[in-house]
Image (spheres, rainbow, N blue to C red):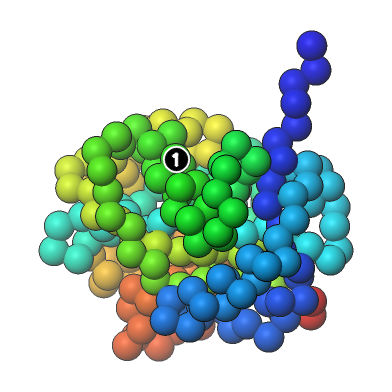
Amino acid sequence: MIPQEQIVLCLPRSIFADWKRFTPWSRASEMIQAAGESMTWLTRSEAEASENLIQPIPCTIVLGENRSFHVFRRIADGRPDLRRRISLLVGGHIDATEHEQDILKLVESTLMREISEELGVEVPLTAKGIGVVVDRSSVLASQHVGIVHEVAIYGRTTPQATEEFFAHSRYTRRPYSPDELLEMRDKFDPWSKILLKYYVHPRKSFDIDQQAILSF
């Protein structure tokens, strides 16, 4: 039997043409809500091949105690700009198993499912929206936008999604302070670099080394 291909939610690429790398939640939530009026569903392969659509990815930063941050080491396979990189985020596509029609509710339910699947955390969590990340630095990066939240999980976190992250890495032994993350920034994936610059450590000026930005 051929496995059924994942059906994922897509939005018009043109909606994000003028968005900055990071848009705070106070503005982004209203814009995402409006964008939901134009949402459509496609197979994952159709979505990846489309030049006119973009895939929203609900994801979250995981806080530890005293405003510290958990990090996760990506596996060696996958997109070239993500391989073995350190990430601040866990999350995934909004797929057709979700039955909500409101896009922000779809984002929330997907986020809770991804936290459960990727971190094995079953306790009730409160997710706080913090903003939207748009990375137009490469063709692959521009296929997705990150709808970013943060949740607090105290204690050690162990990745369960071994198709995404190394289950055991020295980086996952403890959460890190903003200053420690700053020292690690060259190891980060693109979205995590953007979040470090504009959200985690906004008072510290540093360059994000990326490719030339592509136009939508």
**Regarding mark 1 in the picture, which secondary structure is present there?**
helix
Q: Quadrant of the N terminus?
A: top right
Q: Quadrant of the C terminus?
A: bottom right
Query: Is residue 57 visible in this depiction of the protein?
Result: no
| Quarter of the figure with residue 31 | bottom right
Residue at horizontal 70 percent and vertical 61 percent from the top: 39
Query: For this view, does 70 lie left or right of residue 81?
Result: left
Whole-percent x, y for residue 63 in the image: 26, 57
Q: Nearer the viewer, residue 170 or 38?
A: 38
Query: For this view, does 192 lie left or right of residue 173?
Result: right
Query: Is residue 128 visible in this depiction of the protein?
Result: yes
Residue at horizontal 78 percent and vertical 47 percent from the top: 42
Query: For this view, does 213 lie left or right of residue 76?
Result: right
Query: For this view, does 163 lie left or right of residue 197?
Result: right
| Residue type beneath disc 1 | Arg
Residue at horizontal 43 percent and vertical 34 percent from the top: 117
Q: Residue furthest left?
A: 66
Give the tally of numbered discs. 1
Residue 215 vs 156, above or below: the answer is below
Residue 195 vs 61, above or below: the answer is below
Whole-percent x, y for residue 142 in the image: 71, 66
Residue 212 vs 161, above or below: the answer is below
Q: Which residue is mark 1?
A: 113
Residue at horizontal 33 percent and vertical 47 percent from the top: 171
Neighbour tally class for label 1: few under 14, some 14-19, many 20 plus, Cα within 10 Å: some
Q: Nearer the viewer, residue 67 or 59?
A: 59
Whole-percent x, y for residue 168 in the image: 36, 33
